[in-house]
Image: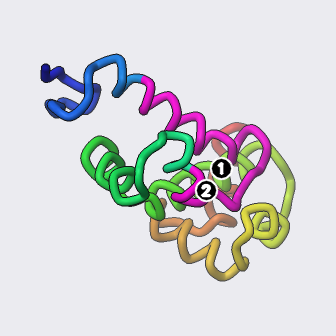
Amino acid sequence: ASFEDPHGKNSTVMEKDDMYNVYCIIDGFFNQIFDNRKMDLSIDDLAKRLHLSCRHVNRILDKYYGCSFHEKLTATKMNYVMYLLEKTDLTVSEISHICDMSATNLIRCFKKYYQITPAQYRKSYKADTD
């Protein structure tokens, strides 16, 4: 049976309840970054939780999230960086260490996602909230 998923696509591979469980597991998996600063997440770990192959997990991510595992992981890390910039006074170097990235790579990725550097974002955020 097919159903309409939250992103407007039909699924004939899994039942509605099964897909809901998959979404919950995937979202919970990536929320580990926010919940306990777990940065060393791998597609193998996610595949084991879902009892699926890595290839199938990537197909699910591509179909329902529009990205690969690596892209989803990077996007989640960038959201966490944004959160840390807003809620802490940690330096970009300290944040990069938490995120298991070099400062240069963090700045490059952040700018790619948000078209602004982390320092510029923090300055803008602080100005908007003061």
Give the side of residue 6 with respect to residue 45, left or right: left
Q: Position of residue 122 (x, y in %)?
A: 69, 56
Which labelled disc corresponds to residue 130?
none
> Which residue type does callout 2 highlight?
Lys
Q: Position of residue 60 (x, y in %)?
A: 32, 46
Give the side of residue 38 with respect to residue 79, left or right: right
Q: Nearer the viewer, residue 103 or 31?
A: 31
Position of the C terminus by quadrant: top right
Q: Which residue is mark 1?
A: 80
Q: Name which residue lies at 70% across and 42% down.
A: 34
Dominant SS type (magenta): helix
Was residue 26 drawn as part of the magenta stretch in this picture? Answer: yes
Quadrant location of residue 92?
A: bottom right
Judging from the image, what secondary structure is the residue with disc 1 in? helix
Give the side of residue 32 with respect to residue 73, left or right: right
Q: Is residue 4 above or below residue 7?
A: above
Q: Which residue is mark 2?
A: 77
Give the side of residue 13 with respect to residue 62, left or right: left
Which range of residues does the magenta coloring cover?
21-45
Q: Position of residue 113 (x, y in %)?
A: 46, 62
Quadrant location of residue 97?
A: bottom right
